[in-house]
Image: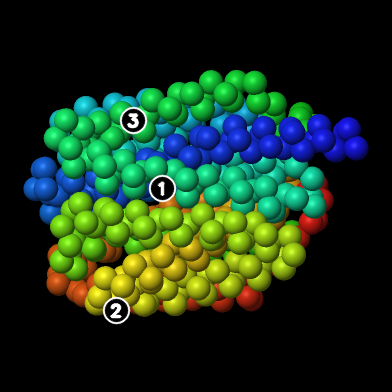
């Protein structure tokens, strides 16, 4: 009994420490969606220029996920964890002093690198550090810190960004300062036992061999499935959520009202995560992920065709509920596909492929909006993307519920 209490305390501590960094990462991504709307007014940027800000962030995330996934398999999860958060925190704080589009794009790239590297490494570390019976639930609860970060971002955007004394620059400083506290917490965080128990050859294995292993007969099926799912989900998520405030303004609401409505929609993310955390050890990863992606598909279509405030709020809340719940299931599902010697590399590669979708999604929205394509058609394309992800899981996915990680 005493040992189980100690294990629970250790798990909760790990969840809190990893989750704080996740929370501040989410604050940054959430604030970016509101900052895009503010920059359109402050700097007079075009939809294409705004799309590039979101896409450069995703380019950095793609590079970070790839490089730090490999780094975490070679040098340890903790080391990668600390390095990525430090990069994110410094670049985020400096972005408050950007003097034009060019400087902001450079800093958003480094923010993206830190953010993209941290997320798959964090989920890998937590997956390897908890018991199989609760692993899925704990990883989903880790992902739920993302919703808290988004809610804080929406609160900052609604109450502070409209104030002349704060604006979007003050919001970026607010995002960076607490991230340094999360960095401090992590110095006492132990590395995962799975990594520590690897032999020295597994840790020194050449990068090209690790990548080749992902496409070997043992792992090819799950790798292809994860790459398709990550690409489609990230493509639709960043295309939809980075543009939500701008879409609300296009539908006739001013900036402050749009931010307030998004705040209400964002609150639905938390029950999305918590229901997945409850279901994932009972139903399994595969079918929970499929169910929540199906809910995302339907909600995205309904949001695109909504023409009243009630329809927008209901469909937007459902979109937040199902889409972020699906992210929780996806982060739990991904590290379980691989053995420990390539787990962070595999999770990082899948996330990196996904970030290519994150680059294309905002760019596509900016291009289509500049060419007068309607919001309903844009969101129908995102629904189609989610359908492709569902089919990939149905045809190629296998259940990994409560399997012991090798």
Q: Callout 2: few (<14), some (14-19), or many (20+) C-alpha neighbours within 10 Å?
A: some
Whether 197 is drawn above or below 342: the answer is above
Please name whichever residue, 46 or 395, is drawn nearer the observer in this view of the structure: 46
For the residues labelled 1 and 2, say whether their Cβ atoms are less than 8 Å apart. no
Colour scheme in the image? rainbow
Sooner in the amino-acid sequence: mark 1 or mark 2: 1
Earlier residue among tags 3 and 2: 3
Residue furthest out toward the left: 44
Q: Position of residue 166 (x, y in %)?
A: 21, 32
Q: Residue at x 36, y 77 (%)?
A: 302
Q: Residue at x 27, y 46 (%)?
A: 158
Q: CA distance from mark 3 to mark 1?
A: 14 Å
Marks 3 and 1: CB-CB under 8 Å? no
Mark 1 secondary-structure assignment: helix
Residue hosting label 2: 305
* Residue 346, percent from left and from top: 62, 49
The residue indicated by pointer 3 is 174
Q: Is residue 202 visible?
A: no
Residue under the point 47% across and 50% down? 147
Kindly give the residue lying farthest to the right in the view shown: 1
Reading the image, the residue beneath label 1 is 150
Quadrant in the picture for residue 379 = bottom left
- Few, some or many C-alpha atoms within 10 Å of disc 3 (few <14, some 14-19, many ≥20)? many
Looking at the rendered image, the quarter that the N terminus falls into is top right
Relative to 302, 399 lies left or right: right
What is the CA distance from the residue labelled 3 to the residue labelled 2?
Answer: 36 Å
Mark 3 or 1 closer to N-term? Answer: 1
Residue beneath the point at 22% across and 56% down: 257
Determine whether 245 is above or below 30 in the image: below
Q: On the picture, is 296 further left or further right than 301?
A: right
Q: Can residue 354 be seen from the camera position used here?
A: yes
């Amino acid at each position: 009994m005493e040992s189980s209490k100690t294990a629970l305390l250790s798990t909760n501590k790990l969840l809190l420490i990893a989750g704080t960094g996740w929370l501040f990462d989410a604050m940054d991504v959430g604030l970016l969606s509101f900052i895009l709307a503010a920059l359109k007014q402050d700097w007079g940027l075009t939809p294409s220029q705004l799309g590039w800000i979101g896409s450069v962030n995703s380019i950095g995330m793609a590079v970070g996920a790839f490089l730090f996934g490999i780094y975490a398999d070679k040098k340890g999860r903790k080391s990668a964890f600390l390095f990525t958060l430090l990069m994110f925190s410094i670049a985020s704080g400096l972005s408050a002093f950007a003097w034009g589009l060019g400087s902001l794009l450079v800093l958003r790239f480094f923010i993206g690198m830190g953010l993209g590297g941290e997320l798959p490494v964090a989920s890998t570390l937590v997956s390897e550090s908890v018991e199989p019976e609760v692993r899925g639930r704990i990883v989903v609860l880790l992902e739920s810190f993302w919703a808290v970060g988004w809610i804080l971002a929406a609160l900052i955007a609604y109450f502070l960004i409209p104030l002349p004394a704060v604006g979007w620059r003050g919001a970026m400083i607010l995002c960076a300062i607490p991230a340094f506290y999360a960095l401090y917490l992590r110095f006492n965080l132990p590395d995962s036992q799975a990594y520590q128990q690897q032999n020295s050859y597994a840790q020194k294995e050449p990068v090209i061999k690790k990548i080749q292993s992902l496409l070997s007969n043992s792992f090819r099926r799950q790798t292809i499935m994860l790459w398709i799912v990550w690409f489609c989900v990230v493509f639709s998520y960043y295309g939809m959520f980075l543009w939500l405030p701008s879409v609300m303004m296009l539908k006739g609401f001013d900036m402050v009202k749009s931010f307030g409505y998004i705040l209400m929609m964002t609150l639905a993310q938390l029950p999305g995560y918590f229901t997945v955390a409850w279901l994932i050890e009972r139903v399994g990863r595969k079918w929970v992920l499929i169910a929540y992606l199906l809910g995302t598909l339907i909600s995205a279509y309904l949001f695109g065709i909504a023409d009243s405030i009630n329809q927008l709020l209901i469909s937007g809340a459902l979109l937040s509920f199902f889409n972020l719940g699906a992210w929780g299931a996806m982060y739990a599902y991904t590290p379980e596909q691989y053995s420990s010697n390539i787990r962070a590399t595999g999770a990082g590669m899948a996330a990196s492929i996904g970030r290519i979708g994150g680059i294309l999604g905002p760019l596509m929205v900016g291009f289509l909006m500049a060419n007068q394509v309607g919001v309903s058609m844009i969101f129908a394309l995102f629904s189609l993307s989610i359908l492709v992800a569902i089919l990939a899981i149905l045809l190629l996915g296998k259940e990994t519920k409560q399997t012991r990680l090798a």
